[in-house]
Amino acid sequence: MLRTVLRREVVALTRLLVVVLTILLALLELGYRGAAPTSGMRQELLTGLMFAAGFVMFGAILRTLLKGQRPRKAEIAWFLVWCSFFAAHPIGLPVWEGVGLMGNLIFLGLFVFIELSRLELGGGFTLSPALLFTFSFILLITIGTALFMLPNAAVRPLGLIEALFTSTSAVCVTGLSVFDIGTTLTPMGLWILLLLVQLGGLGVMTFTSFFAFFFKGSNSLEEQLRIRDLSNTTLGGARRFIVQVILFTLAVEAIGAVFIFQALPDDQFAAFSDRLFFAVFHAISAFNNAGFSTYTNGLYEPVMRYNYALQWVVALMIVFGGLGFGIIFNFTNYLRFWVRARVRRWTLGVPCERYPRVVTLSTKLVLFTTAGLLLFGTIAFWVFERDNALREHSGWFGQLTTSFFGSVTPRTAGFNSVNYGTLTVPTLMITILLMYIGASPGSTGGGIKTSTAAVALFNIFSTGRGRERVETGGREIGVMTVRRAFATIVLSLIFLGVSITVVASLEKDHGLLPIAFECFSAFGTVGLTMGITAELDDAARVALTLVMFVGRVSALTLLIGVLKQVEVSNYRYPKEDILIN
């Protein structure tokens, strides 16, 4: 018995050691400008890790077979490739020269994913979905800060506050930056930024669940319950929803990258790889509503300012990313049913079937609110800027494109095709309103969400008309939904008021409007600025970092995670009205 326990401990320690050393080797190779004398040491370490990983995987497969169970497909596939590596080099050279050091690191990275997929969400700790969601962002921000401080991540050493601000802005898909990322970050730093944007936009737990499903093949009931709560879906549909989110995101980003690539002029980039990277970078940044750009002035750069085709592609990707995955999938199902019924009627003469409530009330509210905000923002931008920012666009199509883009980008996207420091005050106030409302629930964007604004508006009209219930579209909105909308708005306004006060007290050289604009942009995870971000001192940057984090996870989520949830009570106190006006 003791021998069995010791053997298990040794195996577990070996697996952990291989995972840790693989991560350290990757950081050593990618993050530091290694000198020539250390290359041999890295090669020997890689050789040892390849040997150890192979034997660990072989042991895991063998133990599974001895238990009468089927090994995981990912383990078998990895081990077969590992065997082919050594079959190609039987004379003791375990590193496959055809793929080089980086290829072998990627292969070992797959081993790390397989090993990490053995873990379960929560790690045995009882955490509410709100706290688990919050801690996942804190962990990712911490890892991103450490990665940005690696020597190879930037052309100059980044300070702790700079790295923390950039990592938070990327994970919270904000887009604010205290330095020019296109000229300061190296290609490695840009890829780190892109990875953080992708993970932060879709949610850390979404990717964790996806890789657990992919490598592990199944999950415990407790883990599936966590996934259900995090994805806001049913227990049976949690796995399918996660897979749909990942596949849909990659598909839209790939299609967007193709259209962006086609919209770029051939002579704008020195090499094909630069043009391709620009397309991929901006496609991911647009769909995740991040707003990062490799250009110093964003899309206001002279070579991009009049590229209207590119702006339409980016704007549509922002809209898709801000609608919310649940809304998109629900509306897609409705279109699928509608098209299938019409095709059957035209080809077979079968009458169209009726599908009750295929489109949910949430989908209707989000779609109508989004369309209304886009129309309102476009008209307002054109009215207030036709004699100002739009004068440099001579044709009606250019003014329409710029106005529409100016209405889309405050919806937590952050791309700019105009200089926001020169816009009129009415335009800036409307932009602040759009930034505050933000995107839709379950999306990559921030803000209080379109559904919250819609529910609050319906509640105002219902109260004004003396109705006891909030009703719309033949449905009654639940009391808890109305209360959550009210709590979200009140908490966000209180937090924004405190944030603006703190930043204004720290930055006395800037006016109140630029500071308020910056705080609303950070809270809504937008990334638009009137040009003061790089001029802020470290204290103000830390304050804005906190604002970005709270804006991404929401103040109500933090409150729910911290406060103890009350059990359902069977008693009710006598009612008494309170004078409020």
Image: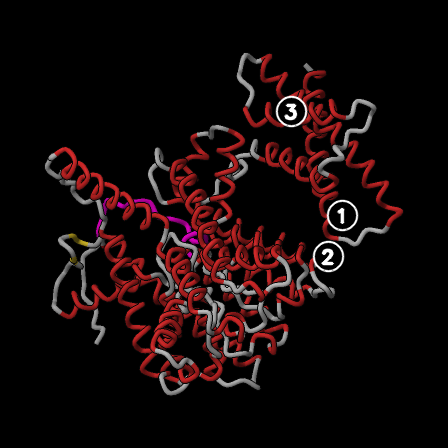
- In the image, the segment drawn in magenta is 559-572
- What residue does disc 1 label? 28
Q: Quadrant of residue 310?
A: bottom left
Q: Is residue 567 magenta?
A: yes
- Please state the horizontal and vertical placement of residue 193, each as a whole percent of the image: 59, 57
- What residue does disc 3 label? 79
Amino acid type, label 1: Leu
Q: Secondary structure under badge 3?
A: helix
Q: Residues within 10 Å of mark 3 (few under 14, many from 20)?
A: many
Question: In the rendered image of this protein, does residue 251 appear above or below residue 537?
Answer: above
Among the two numbered marks 3 and 1 on one chain, the one whose residue lies closer to the N terminus: 1
Q: Nearer the viewer, residue 313 or 455?
A: 313
The residue at the point 44 percent across, 83 percent down is 392
Amino acid type, label 3: Phe
Q: Are marks 2 and 3 in contact (CB under 8 Å)?
A: no
Q: Residue furthest right?
A: 37
Q: Secondary structure under badge 2?
A: helix
Q: Are marks 3 and 1 in contact (CB under 8 Å)?
A: no
The residue at the point 34 percent across, 66 percent down is 489
Please state, as top left, top right, bottom left or bottom right, where the C terminus lies in the image: bottom left
- Please state the horizontal and vertical placement of residue 490, each as a whole percent of the image: 35, 67
Question: In the rendered image of this protein, does residue 74 appear above or below residue 148?
Answer: above
Q: Residue furthest front?
A: 266
Say which mark, if any, is on residue 152.
Answer: 2
Q: Is residue 112 left or right of residue 86?
A: left
Q: Secondary structure under badge 1?
A: helix
- State the separation of the CA atoms marked 2 and 1: 10 Å
Q: Nearer the viewer, residue 144 or 198?
A: 198
